[in-house]
Amino acid sequence: MTIPLSVNAPVGQSELLERLLHPTPLIKDFHYWLDSQSGKRVICSVELDALCTKINTLEATGLELVLNLRLLQEIIRMDLLEITPVMLSITDEWLAYPDLPELLDRIINFKQLTNPILLHIIPEQKASLGRHLKTNIKNLKSRGCSIVIDGCSLDRTDNHIIRGCDGIMYEMDELIAKPENQEQLQIYRNGGKFIQIAGVKPELLPLARQLAGDDFYYSYQ
């Protein structure tokens, strides 16, 4: 769940903060991933309103944290987790935020979750992520969250996140263009990670199945 966090023109941070502090919906639509075995829609990721702009405009202000907490509140209110697992894109810095699991506990009753939350981690932080990262990963997974990372960003992803993740996401174009990514996919699949392939054209589904095996998740381009 790359989850789109962009559209149209950028918006000022003050306007975004005003929107976050008021009960105007942020989610405009949903994007579904399909199970390669059954063809059923099994994971959904949220598509945001234009006001949310690009995620990298939010890093320095702390608005990213507020945005994601608001999104989770909307997801809970819509009972979406009663229907399907939901994937949400967050940066590695957000994943390392102190007391993150406790913050989420105030929004989500993890014991009553029918389906897991998938956290798609975007590597943005260049410096050390600090001592909370490893603990947060452990605590979130114990609550039923799954962690997904980008196969094409492993060189920029913290080793604790790589070791602790549950799944690896690839873009179909990157798999075709770089044979080393195909080899890497096989290594992680054999190591027990689940595989997601984004941007699969209908005619490339047989190739995706050849690369990822019978059991993986994909989204159409």
Image: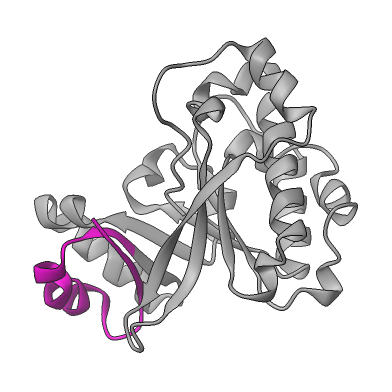
Quadrant the C terminus occupies: bottom left
For residue 62, say whether it is visible: no
Residue 205 included in the magenta stretch of the image: yes
Q: Quadrant of residue 91?
A: top right
Left or right of residue 83, residue 140 in this image: right
Left or right of residue 206, residue 157 in this image: right
Q: Quadrant of residue 116?
A: bottom right
Count of numbered tags: 0
Q: Quadrant of residue 32?
A: bottom left
Residue 73: give x, y in percent of width and height. 77, 50
Residue 211 included in the magenta stretch of the image: yes
For residue 196, say whether it is visible: yes
- Looking at the image, residue 191 lies above or below residue 64: below
The magenta segment: 197-221
Q: Nearer the viewer, residue 54 or 48?
A: 48
Q: Nearer the viewer, residue 80 or 128?
A: 80
Q: Nearer the viewer, residue 124 or 78?
A: 78
Residue 71: give x, y in percent of width and height. 68, 45
- Looking at the image, residue 63 lies above or below residue 198: above
Residue at 33% across / 88% down in the picture? 37
Residue 206: give x, y in percent of width and height. 13, 78
- Looking at the image, residue 189 lies above or below residue 131: below
Residue at 16% across / 51% down in the picture? 173
The type of colouring in the image is one colour
Left or right of residue 95, residue 168 in this image: left
Residue at 19% across / 50% down in the picture? 174
Residue 57: give x, y in percent of width and height. 53, 19
Q: Nearer the viewer, residue 207 or 22?
A: 22
Left or right of residue 56, residue 119 in this image: right
Residue at 78% across / 60% down in the picture? 139
